[in-house]
Image (tube, coloured by chain):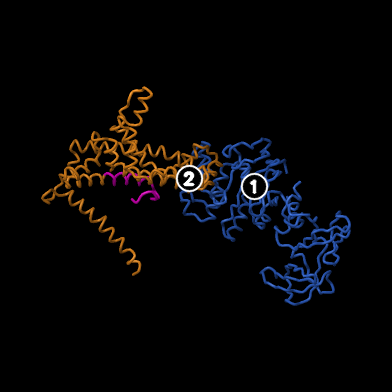
Amino acid sequence: MGQSLIDLQNISKSFDGTMVLDDLNLSVKENTFVTLLGPSGCGKTTTLRIIGGFESPSKGEVIFDGQNITNLPPNKRQLNTVFQKYALFTHMSIAENIAFGLKIKNKSKIYIQDKIKYALKLVNLDGFENRSVSSLSGGQQQRIAIARAIVNEPRVLLLDEPLGALDLKLRQDMQYELIRLKNELGITFIYVTHDQEEALTMSDTIVVMNQGYIQQMGSPENIYNEPENAFVADFIGESNIVPGIMLRDELVEIFGAKFSCVDKGFGFNAPVDVVIRPEDIDLVAPENGSLEGVVTHLIFKGVHYEMEVTSPDGFEWLVHSTDLFPVGQKVGIHVDPFDIQIMNKPASEDEEAVGVNE
Amino acid sequence: MNKKLLSGPYLMWMIGFILIPLALIVFYGLTDKSGAFTLSNVLSISTEEHAKALWLSLGLSLLSTVLCLLLAYPLAMILRTRGMGQGSFIVFIFILPMWMNFLLRTLAWQTLLEKNGVINGILSTLHLPNQGLINTPGAIILGMVYNFLPFMVLPIYNVLMKIDDNVVNAARDLGANSLQVLIRILLPLSIPGIVSGITMVFVPALTTFVISNILGGSKILLIGNVIEQEFTKGSNWNLGSGLSLVLMIFILISMALIAKYDKNGEGTVL
């Protein structure tokens, strides 16, 4: 996949002495869907605003297609932004909203008309030209905001939690729309969200951020299945994070029980964190499991049952299973070797934050 | 029942202090001294003296309104870019003079502008020629702008502060430079504030007689002065009321004109 279109080099940003981004490096390849994912205050929106030109970094450079655009104002950048609360121009009709960028660029009337039609079709709102902004629902407004951005044929579309204000069903519909749009337009999307499901659904690449650092960067599968630290494991999906000791390659001890795994290179008798996803735990007869436990909670979730299994050491394992085990039943916990993910134990919280920022 | 009881005092207030006085003005304006119906009070606006005063009033108040707008808008823009705290402090400073008596503030300008006043005093110590500042249309406009500027700043500031930063960012993002953002986004979105600012400056400026009395001497008669004199010196309440009615009609017309530009009706009552 080609070379990188956007390069953030050693970007730092602080507001009133508070460090929001610390020496961040990120490169985005052309024609990919990149999601910046993290809890609020992790620096993801600031990163997006720096790319858009609405904030200037305290340190570092923004390279766009080989050019240094760090000091270029937003109106001179070849990218467009879709804002969280739509930010439509309420004193203009839908058509005028979409035409805004093109009028500024002095495009011909016919060209603008064509573009408006094309963009409205693309976002499934044909015939909305003369409607007023206030007559649209939230989802429709967001689509207009997207239409308004893409008519300018940006090379990169920046999206700042664009679905945050929509309800669940609409949000899911819009996720598919965005994937379709990205494929039809063939442009680069940089998407900011705190919703891990949204990130997993849409992205080619997910960048997990916390406290101004990139925690992990990779494909959705990679991020989900092989979280590099406890923060990523905890933030993406649900997980059981337990302390363990790596006895040797491919063997880890958890609460005194030995589990075989596929990880290597941690040395001998090294303390580690072990991540096991709730759906990867198989509940079996007590004598067949590596670890014994008692079911202490049971909730029906629709697709599966959510159970809590307490092992003798007091740890409560979160288990997702389509098989029902009633509360009070003794069970055995079994995990397949490739479902066990081993992580280095951070010495402190700070180290956890910097951990993988290389 | 409760709601009716609550609105009672306001209803009485409206009847006693708004509707009855208005009816009285209409009655006086359309009758002569003996109480017979006549239009002569209203039509007397066309006499040379009254028409001249009306046009002068319209001209001066219009000019002051424009000046207030030109001064207030950039100020409100600057305040918008400041943080909330700093912005409201500057607004506070601008409003501070309003806490002092209106008459006192105007008299202070008289002291400054007088023939032997402060400004001419400074000029003569610098061996510069004295200026005839007081009793000129310029002095009246100065008085109007000085007194009414806060009423223009406040509504514009309020409406500008309400505009979401991201709307401005979106316009910039779509390629607009600062001037285009101002003309295509900020100005159209701040029309309600501009309209109420214009209303709150133009109407009192058109009807004032205190400013023209103090800073215009007896040389410059505004329509407000004419009406005032009919009530106080001429004791011809009928003529005074008739002219007041004419002035009201002019205000209604100008409000209607302004309201046309304020589609959302946020700025005026019309």
Identify the mark at residue A18; answer none if there is no mark: 1
Look at chain B in the picture and name its colour: orange
Horizontal and vertical percent position of residue A235: 70, 58
Q: Is residue A106 left or right of residue B263?
A: right
Report the chain holding disc 1: A
Look at chain A in the picture and name its colour: blue
Horizontal and vertical percent position of residue A130: 46, 49
Pick the front one: A150 or A183: A150
Pick the front one: A57 or A99: A57
Mark 2, residues whose alpha carbon is within 10 Å: few (<14), some, or many (≥20)?
A: few
Residue position marked by numbered label 2 in the rendering: B89
Question: Which-is-in-front pick, marks 1 and 2?
Answer: 2
Report the chain holding disc 2: B
Pick the front one: B188 or A150: B188
The image shows residue A343, relative to residue A284, as above or below, that is: above
Mark 1, residues whose alpha carbon is within 10 Å: few (<14), some, or many (≥20)?
A: few
The image shows residue A299, relative to residue A64, as above or below, that is: below
Q: Is residue B117 left or right of residue B51?
A: right
Asked if labels 2 and 1 touch by Cβ distance under 8 angstroms, the answer is no
* Amino acid type indicated by mark 1: Thr
Horizontal and vertical percent position of residue A331: 79, 74
Evaluate whether label 1 is on the same chain as label 2.
no
Magenta residue span: B250-270
Does the rendering let one see residue A22?
yes
| Label 2 residue SS | helix
